[in-house]
Image (spheres, rainbow, N blue to C red):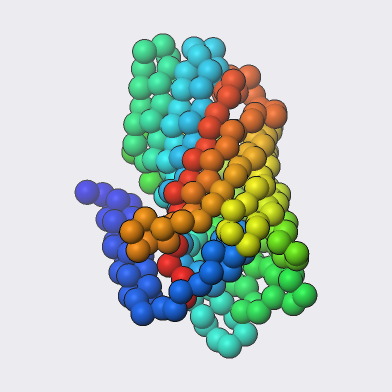
């Protein structure tokens, strides 16, 4: 096992330990309260989402790609006024007929590790967070990652009022080390989002995922509308969501005809 994999395994073990400890002996929260917190990516709430994206009809070989994003979110109170929200996105990818007909790649893609310093209390429903983002070259196949270590800033701002949550997340990554034979990373990601939640915890909303590759001079845009709800699996609170992935703009060699997103989010109320 190489050093990168050891680091990721250790992170998962520590994350699950923190989740288990913090989830013990906490009072129950209503579905409405949980839905409101889950609509806020920097809320003081431990969650472990598994987001599955399936895209079909990709490129010249009519390929398909399934990406399962493991995205634990762990808030840490660092003072009475400030929180530190840690967030990891680790993609697990299986793709067919992308690089060549009849060829498959499976494994990890690159991980994105973010940390947001955020006020502990929102003001008039408005909250924000800023911090660093790190691109970690965890990909197990050269076709699934950049082979580059990257860093940059990330920020989020959002407003919650009358059942609505709307805002935007942004990050910019520049590569600073890695395989010199691979292209440099100079990429911006922007994610405007909105959702309306009812008192039952059900919700409807969506987001745009805009990736601007400054190095390759390409832009990719997806629109992801979803419906969601909160329920229990045994004693475990979970949020489920599903919806289409609609490609708006992207390079023809990587454009899918259509996609589907499904999310299972394990929630650990504080």
Q: How many marks?
A: 0
Can the viewer see residue 170 in this picture? no
Q: Residue visible at 34% across and 36% down? A: 107
Q: Quadrant of residue 36?
A: bottom right
Q: From the top left corner, tell me how far across and down residue 163 is, in percent.
A: 71, 61
**Direction left: furthest residue:** 1
Q: Residue at x 34, y 76 (%)?
A: 24
Q: Position of residue 134 (x, y in %)?
A: 51, 56
Where's residue 109, x and y in %? 42, 40
Can residue 203 be seen here? The reply is yes
**Residue at point 52% right, 82% down?**
78
Seen from the viewer's position, the closer of residues 33 and 75 is 33
* Front one among 222 and 111: 222
Query: Viewed as shown, does residue 94 lie left or right of 188?
Result: left
Q: Is residue 17 above or below residue 209?
A: below
Q: Would residue 55 appear left or right of 100 to someone viewing this image? A: right
Give the answer, above or below, for where 202 lies relative to 224. Answer: below
At x 35%, y 22%, the residue is: 104
Q: In the image shown, does 2 or 111 lie closer to the viewer?
A: 111
Residue 136 appears at what percent x and percent y?
44, 51
Identify the residue at the far front of this view. Answer: 200
Outermost residue to the bottom: 80
Q: Is residue 86 left or right of residue 202?
A: left
């Amino acid at each position: 096992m190489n050093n990168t994999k050891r680091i990721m395994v250790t992170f998962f073990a520590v994350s699950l330990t923190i989740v288990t400890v913090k989830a013990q002996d906490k009072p129950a929260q209503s579905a409405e309260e949980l839905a409101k917190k889950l609509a806020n990516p920097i809320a003081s709430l431990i969650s472990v989402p598994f987001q599955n994206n399936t895209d079909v009809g990709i490129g010249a070989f009519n390929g398909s790609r399934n990406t399962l994003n493991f995205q634990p979110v762990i808030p840490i109170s660092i003072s009475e006024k400030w929180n530190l929200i840690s967030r990891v996105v680790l993609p697990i990818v299986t793709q067919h007929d992308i690089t060549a007909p009849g060829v498959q790649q499976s494994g990890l893609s690159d991980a994105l590790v973010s940390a947001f310093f955020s006020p502990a209390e929102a003001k008039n429903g408005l909250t924000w967070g800023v911090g660093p983002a790190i691109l970690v070259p965890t990909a197990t196949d050269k076709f699934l990652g950049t082979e580059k270590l990257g860093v940059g800033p990330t920020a989020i701002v959002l407003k919650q009022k009358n059942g609505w949550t709307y805002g935007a997340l942004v990050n910019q990554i520049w590569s600073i080390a890695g395989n010199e034979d691979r292209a440099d990373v100079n990429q911006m990601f922007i994610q405007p989002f909105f959702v309306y939640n009812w008192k039952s915890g059900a919700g409807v909303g969506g987001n745009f995922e805009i990736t601007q590759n400054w190095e390759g001079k390409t832009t990719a845009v997806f629109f992801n509308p979803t419906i969601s709800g909160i329920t229990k699996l045994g004693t475990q609170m979970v949020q489920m969501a599903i919806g289409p992935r609609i490609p708006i703009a992207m390079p023809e060699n990587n454009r899918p005809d259509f996609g589907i997103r499904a999310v299972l989010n394990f929630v650990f109320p504080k």
